[in-house]
Amino acid sequence: DIQMTQSPSSLSAYVGDRVIITCRASQSISNYLNWYQQKPGKAPKLLIYVASNSQSGVPSRFSGGGSGTDFTLTISSLQPEDFATYYCQQSYSIPWTFGQGTKVEIE
Amino acid sequence: EVQLVESGGGLVQPGGSLRLSCAASGFTFSSYEMNWVRQAPGKGLEWVSYISSSGSTIHYADSVKGRFTISRDNAKNSLYLRMNSLRAEDTAVYYCARDPSTFTTIFDSWGQGSLVTVSS
């Protein structure tokens, strides 16, 4: 199975900060990497698919990059509604696996 | 508007069975691959099972293989997960998730989740 490791596991930031979350795969997954946002008590929401494609309706401050084993999710200017947990997910091979999550909290 | 509504969760004893349902609306259900993803309390996301649009191809996570069965009824716009021999570690919120892609797997729409609690 492909293991996905996110860093950091949690972070504190101010509104307006630029935030970068990293996801590393245990083997190359090309660009088959998706990002989700989850708020407490809610279902996850797709943000980015195939590494760098923004899902319809997602604010432009969210962007994704990377390929192979190393990927990033960048929030260019953190907004109050962005405080949540973020997950990466590889779709290169079954079983599809998620990172452990990165919790973004208010500083 | 795409809607996925899960039902059928609840409290069940270890070794027991439960069937989850996911009612789909707002899109052509028979054209989409579907999945179940679960989340144990306070934990991360775990993919559970996949079914192709026709139902001809099915995959399971090793943790549920041989105990869970995924199925769908395209005429009823519904997805199912039959769960047998339930264990405490199966306790989780179970989400159904739509996959719009034919060349990769993307979970673009999710239900609100159904809580399954396995406890004596």
Image (spheres, coloured by chain):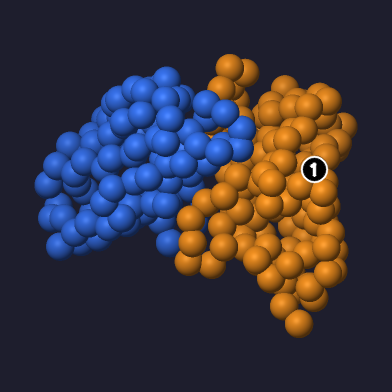
Chain colours: A blue, B orange
The residue that disc 1 covers is B70
User: Looking at the image, can residue B21 be seen?
Assistant: no
Mark 1 element type: strand
* Horizontal and vertical percent position of residue A81: 29, 52
* Horizontal and vertical percent position of residue B51: 74, 33
Horizontal side of B29 relative to B69 (left or right) equals left
Which residue: 72% across, 41% down?
A: B60
**Residue nearer the viewer, B113 or A28:** A28
Specify the quadrant of the image occupied by residue A30.
top left
Q: Amino acid at mark 1?
A: Ile
User: Looking at the image, can residue B120 be seen?
Assistant: yes
Is disc 1 surrounded by few (<14), some (14 to 19) or many (20+) residues within 10 Å?
many
Question: In the rendered image of this protein, does residue B107 appear above or below residue A29?
Answer: below
* Horizontal and vertical percent position of residue A53: 38, 23
Question: In the rendered image of this protein, does residue A12 appear above or below residue A94?
Answer: below
Which residue: 22% across, 56% down?
A: A11
**Residue nearer the viewer, A26 or B103:** A26
